[in-house]
Amino acid sequence: MNSNQIPGDFLPINGTDHVEFYVGNARQAAHYYMTAFGFQPLAYAGLETGLKDRSSYVLRQNKITFVLTSSLLPESPVAGHCKLHGDGVKVIALWVDDARKSFEETVKRGAKPYQEPKTFTDVNGEVITSGIYTYGETVHLFVERKNYKGIFLPGFVKWDPHYKPAPVGLKHVDHMVGNVGWGEMNIWAKFYADVMGFTQLVSFDDKDISTEYTALMSKVMANGNLRIKFPLNEPAAGKKKSQIEEYLDFYHSPGVQHIAMETDHIVETVTALYNRGVEFLKVPMSYYDSVLSRVGKIDEDIAALRDFGILVDRDDEGYLLQIFTKPVEDRPTVFYEVIQRKGAKSFGKGNFKALFESIELEQQNRGTL
């Protein structure tokens, strides 16, 4: 048994293998993620490697791997996805030891198949993948790569351009948040419990996550070794349109709302991101008047946190620091969270109100509140 596995876990997952985005222009999107977020070029597949319908650029920073894929044909599924949703996450790929067993166990429990197990080979060995659907058009791809020594996947070649801006200290995916429709949170929480063997870490209702105007509900589902954490959000009734409703209006289905990436030095990481043009949500300055009385002593300079709008929260095991970008494309859909955990295992419940007020300000500017 792999040391990461939990006895009785029918779907052992080692971690996030990669996240694939379907985008309108993968070459330009890759330049953005390199320039703005410090991702490093890794691999490429396209016309030059024999692909006729798409091109894919693979970027990596520590243990975070993003794949940016765009269509070369107007009628392809990639093009259709971009037309409906804009740029967005299509594939959340999970690193497993046995892709066939992962597929069989999840389909047996009710998952809708996306891809039967397939073996891909080249001179570096073989990779086996399989996949199931989750909320909206999002899929989970199971990736078994224990017999592969290549750079990414068969069919990809090394991508080594001259342009390589420095990394910014992002380490790994902490969690990925899915927005689902009205009344669907419990349905998808049950899916992750029944089909994938996840357990519920925490639940927030509209009393926990609300302001004067908007509200949402959320449940956090996690796998056995806690490497994979998926909060699921659904809208809740409020006086005005919530951020979840806004997302659903523009994405036109449930989908991945944001990806949280962990760093060991949030002030340094956010300084680098800010200097590269990444825009962050700003919380009211009054937040910092009482934050230390709420969370107690922290190692960081509160003035530096205030300058950038970095939030702080504490649980029984420590504290965390977090900040959220504005949406990274024209549709107000996908954004990112940068998080530093100093013992805390939670998700920043004490910051929800300040965060939502800052999001509502952005919604007001967009005319979508």
Image (cartoon, rainbow, N blue to C red):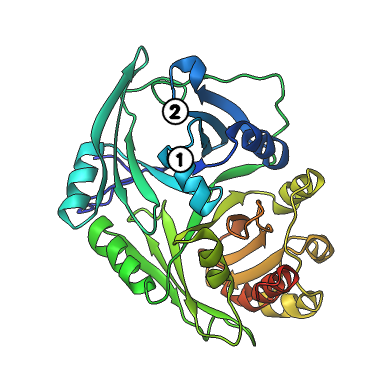
Q: Is residue 103 left or right of residue 271?
A: left
Q: Can residue 101 be seen in this view?
A: yes
Residue beneath the point at 32% across and 65% down:
199
Give me the disc on residue 78. 1
Count of marks placed on residues: 2
Question: Which secondary structure lies at badge 1?
Answer: helix
Establish if 315 lies above or below 191: below
Q: In this view, does 240 lie to the left or right of 102?
A: right
Q: In this view, does 254 lie to the left or right of 364?
A: left
| Residue farthest toward the left in the current orientation of the protein | 108
Q: In this view, does 52 lie to the left or right of 63?
A: left
Residue beneath the point at 56% across and 34% down:
60
Q: Which of marks 1 and 2 is nearer the N terminus?
A: 2
> What is the crowding at mark 2: few (fewer than 14 residues within 10 Å), some, or many (at least 20)?
some
The residue identified by callout 2 is 53
Quadrant position of residue 331 = bottom right
- In the rendered image, residue 161, in percent from the top left (x then y), is placed at 66, 20
Report the amino acid beneath label 1.
Val
Pointers 1 and 2 in contact (C-beta within 8 Å): yes
Residue beneath the point at 35% across and 22% down:
148
Quadrant position of residue 308 = bottom right
Establish if 74 lies above or below 193: above
- Quadrant of the snapshot with the C terminus: bottom right
Report the amino acid beneath label 2.
Asp
